[in-house]
Amino acid sequence: MKHATLVNVGLFQATWFACVLGGPFWGAAGLGLMFGFSWRAQSLAVDATYAGIAAVIGLCLDTLWIQAGVLDFFDSAVAPLWIIMLWVGVGLSVNHGLAYFKDRALLGGLLAGVAAPICYLSGESLGAVGVPNVALLGVVAVTWFVVFWLGFSVSGVRRMELSDVDI
């Protein structure tokens, strides 16, 4: 694994903890570092596009799960800013810490599906989110599998198209 990949993974993990434990203020600091990483890697435009797409997906999914009673963000009817910021961090990782899965979309989707309940249960143990019915995290797991499998598939195709143009 390249040094830059490890740096991106570390920045995302730090951003995860910053968002979950410190909310939007500390999450913004983490995202600032991640955007700086993308700028330094000369991939800011593409990374920012993925980040925007991920933000919309996260807003929609987490709001849906709140409305369906799968997750409880403590009296919030829509996904809170800090969770959307986490999705932005995921988008900023697609070309870096998650790039391995672009050619392995099925594996990436499966790992995301397994990670989904772990992420939300970890957030619950830290007091950031409530999980009223753990069994319903199965819905989240299946959704994450589909979203990440499709996302890695599309980003992998896009990369292949770009590499064809660069020849």
Image: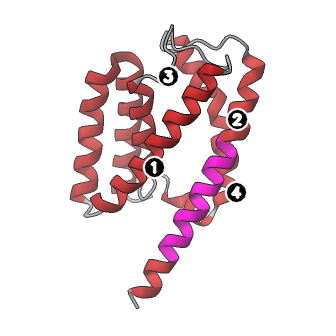
Q: Is disc 4 placed on a helix, strand or loop?
A: helix
Mark 1 and mark 4 lie on one chain; the one further toward the N terminus is: 1
- For the residue carrying disc 4, how many other residues have a C-alpha within 10 Å: few (<14), some (14-19), or many (20+)? some
Q: Is disc 2 placed on a helix, strand or loop?
A: helix
| Pair 1/4: label in front | 1
- Residue matched to label 1: 53
Per the rendered image, the range of residues in magenta is: 144-160
What amino acid type should be assigned to the residue bearing mark 3?
Val
- Residue 8 position within the rendered picture, expressed as x and y whole percent measured from the top left: 36, 48
Mark 4 and mark 2 lie on one chain; the one further toward the N terminus is: 4
In the drawing, does residue 56 fall left or right of residue 36? Answer: right
Q: Is disc 1 placed on a helix, strand or loop?
A: helix
- Where does the C terminus fall, quadrant-wise? bottom left
Mark 3 and mark 1 lie on one chain; the one further toward the N terminus is: 1
- For the residue carrying disc 2, how many other residues have a C-alpha within 10 Å: few (<14), some (14-19), or many (20+)? many
What amino acid type should be assigned to the residue bearing mark 1?
Ile
Mark 1 and mark 2 lie on one chain; the one further toward the N terminus is: 1
Mark 3 and mark 2 lie on one chain; the one further toward the N terminus is: 3
Q: Pointer 3 and pointer 1: residues touching (CB < 8 Å)? A: no
What amino acid type should be assigned to the residue bearing mark 2?
Ala
User: Between marks 1 and 4, how big is the CA–CA gap?
Assistant: 20 Å
- Residue matched to label 3: 78
